[in-house]
Image (cartoon, rainbow, N blue to C red):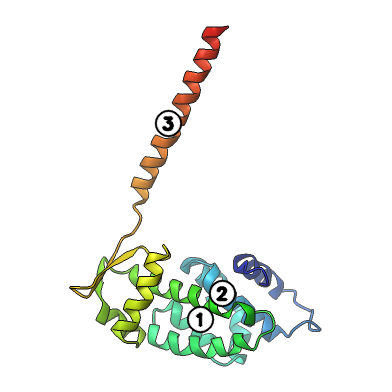
Amino acid sequence: MYSRDFKQASALFQDAIATFSATELFSYQQVIFYVVVTSIIALDRVELKAKVVDAPEILTAIGQTPHLKEYLDSLYSCQYQVFFRAFNEIITLIKSDPYLAAHVRYYMREVRVVAYAQFLESYKSVTLASMAAAFDVSPSFIDLELAGLIVSGRLNAKIDKVAGVIETNRPDAKNALYHDSIKKGDLLLNRIQKLSKVIDVE
C-alpha cells in the first residue's frame, strides 16, 4: 500500500484472510478493512462480487467496522447516494490510518473514477441532472468532476454543456483489434521484406 500498488495489496490481503494470525501487526478486523478498501479500486465488478462481496470470511467480520459493509454493498448494487455517504465515513477512517493516510487524495480520486465509470457504463447518454441526482450532488459538482477526469483520460465520455448531457464514448473492442492486427501485419511485412533483401544479397 505504501507504493500505491493497490491491486497487489488487495491480492495479498485476500490471500492472508484464511490463515491470518499476525495480530501483533493489526487485527483481523483491520485486515478485512484493507481488503475492502483496496479491492474497490483494484478489482472489476465481477471480481469484486466473487472475491469480496460474497466471500464468507469477509461477510463474518465486515460489520465490525462502521459503514464498511454499506460502502461495499452500495457500490456493487449501484446505490450511489448511499455509497457516497458511506464513502465520506470511510475516508475519515483512512485519514487516521498509518498506512493509508498518505494516499487519501489519490484514493478518493480513484474511488470516484470507479463509481462514475460504473454509473456511465449503463448509458449511451445521460443528463448531468440525472447523474447528479443519482449521487446526491449538484449538477455543477458533477460537471466539474467529470470534466477533470475526462481531460485526464480517466473517463471515456464527453459533456455537451449546451444540452446538459454526458455522452459516453466507449472504446470499440473490435475496432481496436482491427487496428492492432493491421499494425502487426505491417510489422510482419516489413520484416519479410528485410529478410528477402538479405537473402537476395547472399
Contact flag, marks 1 and 3 (Cβ < 8 Å)? no
Q: Is residue 57 visible?
A: no
Q: Residue at x 45, y 34 (%)?
A: 184
Label annotation for residue 187: none
**Nearer the observer, 45 or 152:** 152
Query: Which residue, given by chain and number where applicable, does mark 1 sit on?
Result: 72
Query: Which residue, given by chain and number where applicable, does mark 2 sit on?
Result: 52
Q: Position of residue 190 (x, y in %)?
A: 46, 25
**Nearer the observer, 200 or 50:** 200
Q: Which residue extends farthest left?
A: 163
Of the image marks 1 and 3, the number of the one nearer the N terminus: 1
Amino acid type at image mark 1? Leu
Spatial distance from mark 1 to mark 2, Cα to Cα?
A: 9 Å
- Camera-near label (1 vs 2) is 1
Q: Residue at x 49, y 66 (%)?
A: 44
Q: Position of residue 121 (x, y in %)?
A: 35, 67
Q: Quadrant of the N terminus?
A: bottom right
Q: Residue at x 53, y 86 (%)?
A: 69
174 above or below 119? above
Q: Residue at x 58, y 78 (%)?
A: 37
Which type of secondary structure does the marked residue at label 1 adopt?
helix
Label annotation for residue 185: 3
In the image: residue 104, left or right of residue 131? right
In the image: residue 174, left or right of residue 194? left
